[in-house]
Amino acid sequence: MITTELQSAEHKIINIKEIVPGYNPRSSLDIDEDFIKSIKSLGILEPLLVRPKEGKYEIIAGHRRLKAAESVGITEIPALVRDLDDEQAEHIAYIDNKERKDYTPIDEACHFAYMKEKHGWSLRDMEKAGYGDHTIIRHKIGLLTLPERVAELLARANSLTERHCRHIVQLCDREKLTKIFAENRDNFIVPENWESEEEQEYWRWRLNQEIKYRQDYQIKLAEQTVQNEWTAKSLEIRVRELKEELDERMKKIKEEIEEGKKLNLIMDGIYFKSSADMKELQENSVGVVITSPPYLANKEYEEEEVKNHENPIEWYKDLLHKSFKECYRALMPGSYVCLNINDIPNINTVLEKDAPSEMQPIAEIVHPIMKEIGFRLKDIITWKKDDPWRNNPHVKYEEQEGCYRILPSREYVFLYQKPGTRKITPSQRIDSSIAKEEWAEWASGLWNIPSVRKNDDHPAKYPDELVRRLVKMYSFKGDIVLDPFLGSGTTVKVARELDRKGVGYEINEKYKPAIHAVLSSEE
Ligand SMILES: C[S@@+](CC[C@H](N)C(=O)[O-])C[C@H]1O[C@@H](n2cnc3c(N)ncnc32)[C@H](O)[C@@H]1O
């Protein structure tokens, strides 16, 4: 602890060039016009405090005076020279500054943490040294664990206050999390092909994921507080609710690690079988279904079935009926199926009829099936994709007799809801907000999204962006996002990127490499 007996001081006039920078607890030295004017007319009245340092003088107190003097061209400056050790100098620098102008909460917190780390000061030492009550000091040091974005809002005028932040801090107790992970590091089971170095770092990676998960909520709540001008009291209620949920999550993580469960493996939740039976999924457990079933469009994965069935339309209806009935069972009440599909341009090619071409609106097939299962049609999104003549050399301008054919560059996303009300948790309520700009673009139901051009490992991929919007609009963080017709794995990949659990069924094992590649890519 600091000694109060200071060496005697010596008054001197020092050339400004002889002064070197020293410890300064204030992160910004804002000097107003009035201060500069007074220095200009009267000079520096009160001496700076400095200590001798390698033939020069290190400034301890008076950083603002020194900066103002420099700015008006003063070269000689009065100073009090004292022999001080680091501990004394740094403590005095803090106290002197505090008396002149309020610190930002983060500046104070940094100084407290610095004294603790560098000089081994306890909270009680700081209290005795005049830094305030030890519990307040502890709270302040806690502010340093806040994500940068929250600290930024705290530093801004008329934004977050320190009282707000004291609540937000509670959502991410790094020390407690680190302890749980460190104590159980040997229990982590890692993927077989990992290098030993990666293995060692695995638990640390999982810990950081957990910290990030909680920090996301800290940022969201801080932003919502500023946007909605919540008082510290109303924020406290939200934090308390969310904290209960996060504590529950912490308990589960602890159990998971203690049991040595495999975590986050690439092909977890991917089943190579027909979605006509999804017994792996519990009733009322899925948050949203996002999918694109076969379209009866002569793709390689449906060719055989169409050929083998006398009435392919009946086969097709049966396929949809069975799979979506299973989806209905697995979905939580009030949740959605987002079904991407298209009209059949010429039904007679499917039926192998030698009749003139005739279009089959897909809604006539799909809606009765979904209605019969129990779903309610809520909305239809029109997806405007690339014009077919832009990237398909076979589709081109041709003069026709009398009239022209439409070559549609649109598909649909039918939105069906399972009746009931979706129950959501406090964290899901916080997550449910999408940015205003996104809402303004998406709410019209007309979505302009380029098609996937690279279809070399699967012939009918839909774009990540289509799925991203649907995931954000119709599910919540932590939800299971199910795709019963997984194809190349797009839905699961996007779901994971948005912190959902992706589950997929794909009947064709030949798409396994494509799915593995998509899910292990870092894009
Ligand atoms: C239109 S593709 C889906 C493409 C996917 N959205 C993507 O981005 O890659 C339909 C997929 O459903 C698969 N499929 C067909 N019948 C199925 C069934 N009964 N169960 C599971 N998958 C099936 C097909 O093999 C095909 O890969």
Image (cartoon, grey):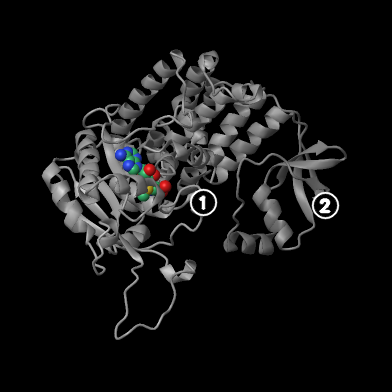
Counting the numbered discs, the total is 2
Residue 333 picture location, percent across and down:
18, 38
Residue 311 picture location, percent across and down:
21, 49
Relative to 364, is 472 on the left or the right? right
Vertical side of 303 occupied by 23: above or below: above
Residue 67, picture quadrant: bottom right
Residue 213, picture quadrant: top left
Of residues 309 and 82, which is closer to you in this image?
A: 309
Mark 1 or 2: in front is: 1
Of residues 82 and 309, which is closer to you in this image?
A: 309
Residue 26 picture location, percent across and down:
60, 44
Residue drawn at (17%, 47%) of the image: 370
Sooner in the amino-acid sequence: mark 1 or mark 2: 2
Residue 405 picture location, percent across and down:
32, 76
Relative to 90, is 305 on the left or the right? left
Rate crowding at label 1 as few (under 14), some (14 to 19) or many (20 or more) other CA atoms within 10 Å: few
Relative to 53, is 382 on the left or the right? left
Of residues 69 and 340, which is closer to you in this image?
A: 340
Vertical side of 384 occupied by 200: above or below: above
- Give the amino acid type for the residue marked by disc 2 in the picture: Lys
Query: Does any atom of ligand 1 lie closer than 8 Å to the CB of label 2?
Result: no
Q: Mark 2 points at which residue?
A: 17
Residue sticking out furthest to the front: 354
* Residue 436 seen in this snapshot: yes
- Give the amino acid type for the residue marked by disc 1 in the picture: Asp
Q: Mark 1 points at which residue?
A: 456
Q: Is mark 2 on a helix, strand or loop?
A: helix
Label 1 and label 2: CA atoms lie apart by 69 Å
Rate crowding at label 2 as few (under 14), some (14 to 19) or many (20 or more) other CA atoms within 10 Å: few
Q: What element carries label 1?
A: loop
Of residues 171 and 510, which is closer to you in this image?
A: 510
Quadrant in which ligand 1 is drawn: top left
